[in-house]
Amino acid sequence: SNVPRIQPSILAADFANIQDEVARIRSADGVHVDVMDNHFVPNLTFGPQMVEAVQRVSTVPLDVHLMITDADRWAPGYAELGVFSVTFHAEATNDPVALARRIRAIGSRASLALKPGTAVEPYLDLLPEFDQVLVMTVEPGFGGQSFMAEMMPKLRTLRVAAERHGIELWLQVDGGIALDTIAVAAEAGADTFVAGSSVYGAADVDAAIAGLRAAAAH
Ligand code: DX5
Ligand code: ZN
């Protein structure tokens, strides 16, 4: 799909009306589903049954973000639901390459997430094993936090390395993405943008999505 891609996070949606909340963002490029386990992060959200339910009613691809311990054990099960993309955290796997290969073999895109304190350099030679890298621009766990502009050098490093490898790597950012921050991330090399509160908190979600797309394209 064309860049920039906007993926609203249903973490900021009304959980009592999830089917409607997913339908409301049909003009987006995907729906971001934050899976949290009260262990890798201090918050608890959805498991595979909820992801399967969202998959059943969504007209846009599912971008599943696993903020869970022991990704090696659990991530392939999410790919088996048939979701578009499965993101696991570098900090939660013993072997990111082996896990990415399993996810790809099942048929989902494999995406590697880096917490703000995690350096990107150890992963640069491994980038052809992934379809996407997620650079967290907040500490994972909660919506509504402030964008960390100090993560932008990671995006620049990843963009250069992806070009060196000659691969089409999607560079995703997640956390504090809004009209005033998205251009900063786009300029640093991001092409795929998760936005929770700035989309679901808007009176007109279609206008919010279109506005983010326009701001990222500048
Ligand atoms: C945070 C989650 C994000 C969150 C973003 O741990 O990974 O996807 O929903 O929310 P905003 O856009 O409000 O920062
Ligand atoms: Zn997320």
Image (cartoon, grey):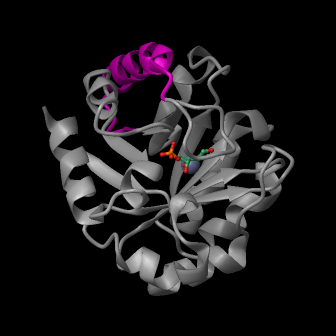
125 and 179: which is toward the camera: 179
Q: Residue at x 66, y 21 (%)?
A: 118
Residue in view at x 65 percent, y 40 percent:
97
Q: Tell me: residue 120, above or below residue 74.
A: above
- Left or right: residue 68 versus residue 177 is right
Q: On screen, 96 above or below 110?
A: above
Q: Could you tell me what secondary structure mostly forms the magenta stretch?
A: helix
Q: Residue furthest front?
A: 203
Does residue 166 show up?
yes
Q: Is residue 177 magenta?
A: no
Q: Is residue 103 above or below residue 115?
A: below
The residue at the far right in this view is 39
Disc tally is: 0
Decide if residue 12 is on the left or right side of residue 202: right
**Which quadrant: the N terminus?**
bottom left
Query: Is 202 left, or right, of 129 in this rendering?
Result: left
- Pinpoint residue 92: horizontal percent, then vertical percent: 77, 40
Q: Does the magenta stretch include residue 163?
A: yes
Question: Percent from the top left, x then y, of residue 99?
Answer: 68, 49
Bounds of the magenta segment:
147-171
Q: Would you place residue 186 above or below residue 124 in this image? A: below
Percent of width and height locating residue 40:
81, 43
Residue at 57 percent across and 20 percent down: it is 120
